[in-house]
Amino acid sequence: MEGEAAPRRRSPLLFLVPLILFGGLAIIFGIGLFSGDASRVPSALIGKTAPAIALTPVEGLARGGQPVPAFGNADLGQGRATLVNVFASWCAPCKVEHPVLVGLSQTDAVKQGKVALVGMNYKDEAENARRFLGALGNPFSAVGADKGGRAAIEWGVYGVPETFLIGPDGRILDKHVGPLDQAAAARLLQRALKGS
């Protein structure tokens, strides 16, 4: 028909704009996700006194016929460094790191009491925690039950396992996210012995 304008054609490049934007964002997120060390998640608590904690013992957990005690803030520091490992029986990476913790418990620093190694049992049933530590060995001098996960929230735990280094003065010196390997355990132990 006369007088009608011909339909305006869109440029085929216009359809590429969303695809290009999505690709650019994916690259930016990918660089952020895969660069750096995921175990070194920053924590606002580094350098601060460890948050208040008063855990109960894991019911029925014993070593050498004696009940394994829980721990609280009064037990942290005490003039020596403390490694606090957050673990659970249902956590597969916790099983992977457990031999490293058992190895840590056999070091002279831990055996001689220069560094304490304690466990925070996260959202677990006592029976399962006892079975886990019974089967794999109990490297901890104290194990506190955080059945509801409240203490872990206060400590800024992202997920299990995580390990905190508490200095002799009760301040959090370092935090390792994920399962410990030999290198990470050695680094934490060395820092614990330096006390800074």
Image: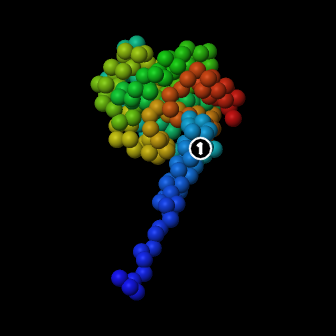
Query: Image quarter for residue 114?
Result: top right
Disc 1 is placed on an element classified as helix
Q: How is the image coloured?
A: rainbow
Can you say whether 33 is above or below 83 in the image? Answer: below
Is residue 196 or residue 42 the one in the foreground?
A: 42
Residue 41 in percent (x, y) is at 57, 41
Residue at the front extreme, as displayed:
2
For the point 51% across and 39% down, the residue is: 73
The answer to whether residue 13 shows anywhere in this view is: yes
Q: Is residue 101 left or right of residue 132?
A: right
Crowd band around label 1 with a 10 angstrom C-alpha radius: few (<14), some (14–19), many (20+): few
Can you say whether 28 is above or below 104 in the image? Answer: below
The answer to whether residue 143 shows anywhere in this view is: no
Residue 9 in percent (x, y) is at 46, 69
For the point 62% across and 23% down, the residue is: 183
Q: Is residue 65 left or right of residue 81?
A: left
Is residue 96 or residue 19 the one in the foreground?
A: 19
Residue 196 in percent (x, y) is at 69, 35
For the point 51% across and 21% down, the residue is: 101
Q: Disc 1 marks which residue?
A: 31
Which amino acid type is marked by label 1? Ile
Query: Image quarter for residue 69?
Result: top left
Is residue 86 or residue 70 the one in the foreground?
A: 86
For the point 63% across and 34% down, the residue is: 168
Name the image quarter holding the N terminus. bottom left
Residue 20 in percent (x, y) is at 53, 54
